[in-house]
Image (cartoon, rainbow, N blue to C red):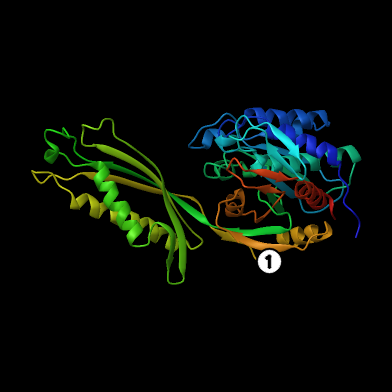
């Protein structure tokens, strides 16, 4: 089995540079410019580099769209797409990465590293540079750096499919262990609930008010007590839900008039995910009707939900999965598959008709200040990417 060579020092320098660039969701312009500069310095022609209008189509706006690079093949074969997202969670902004033994960590104990997913973004950049510097033979290639993954996969949702060149084999880097190919992921619904009560003086006339907080408290309590919040198991059906954001109130002496809640429901089973959303609605409807003021008036709710991304599961015989497993094996690892409970850009690429397998490159403890990047796993991810981009 031939060894897959990469410039390890360059790959590590690139990932350290990438993780130090601020760029949380909707604010990825500096990262995109950095990538573009690196590509142009490597003699990628301007005509091969485009940015789509995903930010204009996104509900969150944004400073830039997805970055797309297309290279013609030096031999004929199905076009391959390599992708990774470039945004980070806000906790990573201001990161100063440092190498400590087998890991790269953040110098600042209050800042996350941003290996999720600057490591994946660098895997793609490393592959491009290796191919161009060494003039390696390759089939037609598309490289896609997406935006706004961390806030609902919005970049992948709104990607300009027509600009990707009809790839037939698609690979996404966004995970930890490079020996694992993620072939499926859950789907998610976002839920927005606006609870409206009736304001009154909380000391002089509390009986005249209807507390929005009281309504929400009763609804949440019912969801927890009946097994519809957190890890949810009903027979053979499974899912999760979470109320993650609660905002309301202005003063302690006013019965709370309004309260906004933002929640999510996840399941690999679309019908069961909708059932979870339905149980949320019923819990809040019952809570509204159970609380009235001294004149019999009640509050109200405005309830809305949206499927942010659908679940998917690829067959192990899917060509992209087969190619991924072979590349993992050729890198000296024992290839495995898994299905995850998080969302991936692969959810939307697959929904767009481009079956996509996801691969890891050493990220650990993501979205926390304990995040780190395992150096050898990252370098292995780079080798696997180069193999997938160049193998006949």
**Residue that mark 1 sits on:** 316
Residue lying farthest bottom? 235
* Residue at (63% x, 37% y) in the render: 66
Residue 115 placement (x, y as % from top left): 67, 41
Of the 4 image quadrants, the one containing the C terminus is bottom right
In the depicted view, which residue is nearer to us: 162 or 118?
118
Give the answer, above or below, for where 140 lies relative to 97: below
Left or right of 228? Residue 16 is right
Task: Tell me how many marks there are.
Answer: 1
Q: Is residue 324 visible?
A: yes
**Label 1: element kind:** loop
* Residue at (21% x, 36% y) in the render: 255
Residue 138 placement (x, y as % from top left): 85, 48
Of the 4 image quadrants, the one containing the N terminus is bottom right
Give the answer, above or below, for where 263 lies relative to 86: below
Q: How dense is the environment of label 1, judged by Cα within 10 Å: few (below 14), some, or many (20 and up)?
A: few
Residue 360 placement (x, y as % from top left): 70, 51
* Residue at (75% x, 62% y) in the render: 335
Residue 254 placement (x, y as % from top left): 21, 33
């Amino acid at each position: 089995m031939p060894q897959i060579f990469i410039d390890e020092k360059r790959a590590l320098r690139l990932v350290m540079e990438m993780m130090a660039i601020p760029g949380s969701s909707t604010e990825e312009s500096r990262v995109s410019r950095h990538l573009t500069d690196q590509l142009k310095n490597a003699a990628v022609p301007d005509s091969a580099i485009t940015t789509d209008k995903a930010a204009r189509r996104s509900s969150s706006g944004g400073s830039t769209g997805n970055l797309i690079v297309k290279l013609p093949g030096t031999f004929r074969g199905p076009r391959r797409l390599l992708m990774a997202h470039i945004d980070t969670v806000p906790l990573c902004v201001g990161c100063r990465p440092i190498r400590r033994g087998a890991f790269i960590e953040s110098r600042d104990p209050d800042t996350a590293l941003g290996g999720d997913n600057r490591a994946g973004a660098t895997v793609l950049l490393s592959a491009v540079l290796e191919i161009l510097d060494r003039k390696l033979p390759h089939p037609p290639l598309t490289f896609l750096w997406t935006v706004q993954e961390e806030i609902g996969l919005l970049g992948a949702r709104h990607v300009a499919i027509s600009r990707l060149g009809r790839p037939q084999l698609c690979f996404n880097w966004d995970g930890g262990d490079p020996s694992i190919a993620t072939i499926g992921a859950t789907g998610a619904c976002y839920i927005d609930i606006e609870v409206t009560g009736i304001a009154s003086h909380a000391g002089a006339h509390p009986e005249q008010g209807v507390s929005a907080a009281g309504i929400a408290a009763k609804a949440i309590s019912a969801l927890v007590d009946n097994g519809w919040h957190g890890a949810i198991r009903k027979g053979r059906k499974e899912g999760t839900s979470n109320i993650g954001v609660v905002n309301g109130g202005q003063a302690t002496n006013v019965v709370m008039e309004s309260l906004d809640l933002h929640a999510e429901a996840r399941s690999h089973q679309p019908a069961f995910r909708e059932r979870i959303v339905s149980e949320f609605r019923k819990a809040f409807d019952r809570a509204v009707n159970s609380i009235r003021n001294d004149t019999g008036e009640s509050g109200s709710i405005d309830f809305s939900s949206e499927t942010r991304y659908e679940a998917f599961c690829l067959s192990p015989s899917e060509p992209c999965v087969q190619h991924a497993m072979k590349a993992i094996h050729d890198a000296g690892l024992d290839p495995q598959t898994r299905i995850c409970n998080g969302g991936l850009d692969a959810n939307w690429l697959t929904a767009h008709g481009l079956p996509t397998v996801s691969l890891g490159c050493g990220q650990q403890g993501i979205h926390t200040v304990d995040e780190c990047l395992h150096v050898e796993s990252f370098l292995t991810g780079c080798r696997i990417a180069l193999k997938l981009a160049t193998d006949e």
